[in-house]
Amino acid sequence: MLSPKVKRALCLSVGVFLLATGCALIPVFKYVIHQTIAKEVPIAEGSLLYDDWVVPPVPVYYQLWVFNLTNPLEVIAGAKPYVIQRGPYTYREHRKKYNITFEPNGTISYRQLHWYTFDRSRSCGPDTDKFTTANVPMLTVANLIRFEYPWVQELVELVQKATIDSSLFGQYSVRDITWGYEDNLLKAAKEIVGRFNVTIDDKVGLFYGTNNTDDGLYNIYSGSDDISKLAIINRWNGLTRLPYWSTDSARMINGTDGTFFPPFVDKSWTMYVYQTDICRSLYLNYKQMKTLRGVDLYSFVLPDSVFADLPENQGFCTPSEQYCLPAGLLNVSNCKPEFAPILGSQPHFYAADPSVQQAVIGLNPTPGEHQTNIDVEPNTGIVMNIDKKYQVNILIRNYTQMKSTHNINFLVFPILWLNESVTLDKKLADMFKSKVATPVKITQAVQYGLIILGTLIALCVVSFMIKECAGHKRKIPYKNMDVSKSEETDSSRTTGKHNSTVAPAID
């Protein structure tokens, strides 16, 4: 039969052992999890991510909100434009990678096909809805004239004749202004400039030429040699630097395409994404933790500094570092084959210079609603939610050959903004939790359970021992006090009896 002291010692030993085991398992389990993920997530045929990398398993939506101009005649006369937002008009974006080639240096080359189908059920109306906006073909021709090529005189005459029946603003359908339509003005200009070996497309659209095509040849790291480089772009169209901008930092092709990131994401990371639609890399910073369908995510948001008037953004000033647009704007036409003076921004001119915001009535830039964010599962680097937001604007300035612009000095007119969104659905969330999240949580539960159980056992034993020791200390002085008091009482009793029997003598 074990004595109480031995039992307490055994219990204390068990508690300490469980606590030490739980602490020791933290780096062990972390290593095992890291090794398992590092083995599974590299992009290779048959790997965990490969099929989802080739064809996204969840739908991608391309939502458009157009700005309908309500006072075109007043704007021509010099008033501020008043716009009303209409939308969303939603297209389902389909993606599929093709010409996939695994290179010897641990990279993958591929192209990605994009095509779009209109989703009426997710739209406020058909994409044949018309709205009043800027006459992009006229402004395109006017922008051509500014560069004063040898054929400038003939184009000037063309614009002068066109402005008799044309206006600075017109009505266009969502479908036409987005995906393109044939324009008579550009058709006439095409015939003229063709004599000078200059090519102009007679079709115009903000995203003309992007439907049912790809956005270039990518070469990315597969992660097989170095997991920290997973999905990072090595080259795009054979380039490691972009030719459109004026500084080395602005020319850099940084990060991934925004659908995957290297695993083991840390909150301190700056997440870089290369965007072909604006021909530059962007960066996002950590904002908060999110839980989507039971999956814990890190949410990264595009900071205001990306398009701010800061020294590090001087390289995006065009045509030279001395000519910078107001904060919040990017000259996208600098990298596009079209000649339209298109400027990019965040929706509703969020985080743009107040002069740009205040030049248009009807805008309401709101944090969160008009910011780009990417939500990443930190263990694997898989993006579970994307809201990529971007606004397309056209610059209207005082063109000598266009009478309708004579009362306008410098106006950045918003045409539409879009949200390219992807959200984890329940089916994929359940699959991810069963394969990744649940095993990770089980290992964490085991290690922390051992730590908690061991700590409780040890505390209980130590607490009992302290209590018992304190009891012994109280018991000993208590007995001494009783003995002393007893002796004192007995003594006093004896003395009292003696005194009571002795009486003074009476004479």
Image (spheres, grey):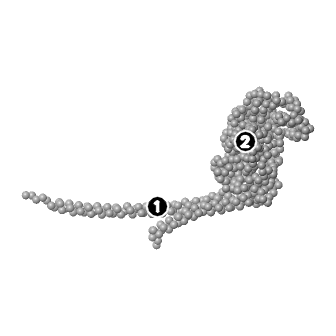
Residue 162: x and y in percent read 86, 31
Q: Residue shown at 72%/53% (left/top)?
A: 260
Location of residue 244 (image quadrant): top right
Sort mark 2 into few (<14), some (14-19) or many (20+) by Cα contacts within 10 Å. Answer: many
Residue 317: x and y in percent read 75, 40
Q: Residue shown at 73%/58% (left/top)?
A: 223
Q: Residue shown at 80%/55% (left/top)?
A: 109
Residue 43: x and y in percent read 75, 57
Can you identify the residue that label 1 sits on?
Answer: 463
Q: Quadrant of the C terminus?
A: bottom left
Q: Secondary structure at mark 2?
A: helix
Can you identify the residue that label 2 sits on?
Answer: 314
Location of residue 304 (image quadrant): top right
Which residue is at the front of the view, 161 or 450?
Answer: 161
Query: Between marks 2 and 1, how big is the CA–CA gap?
Result: 66 Å
Horizontal side of residue 2 vs 325, given as left or right: left
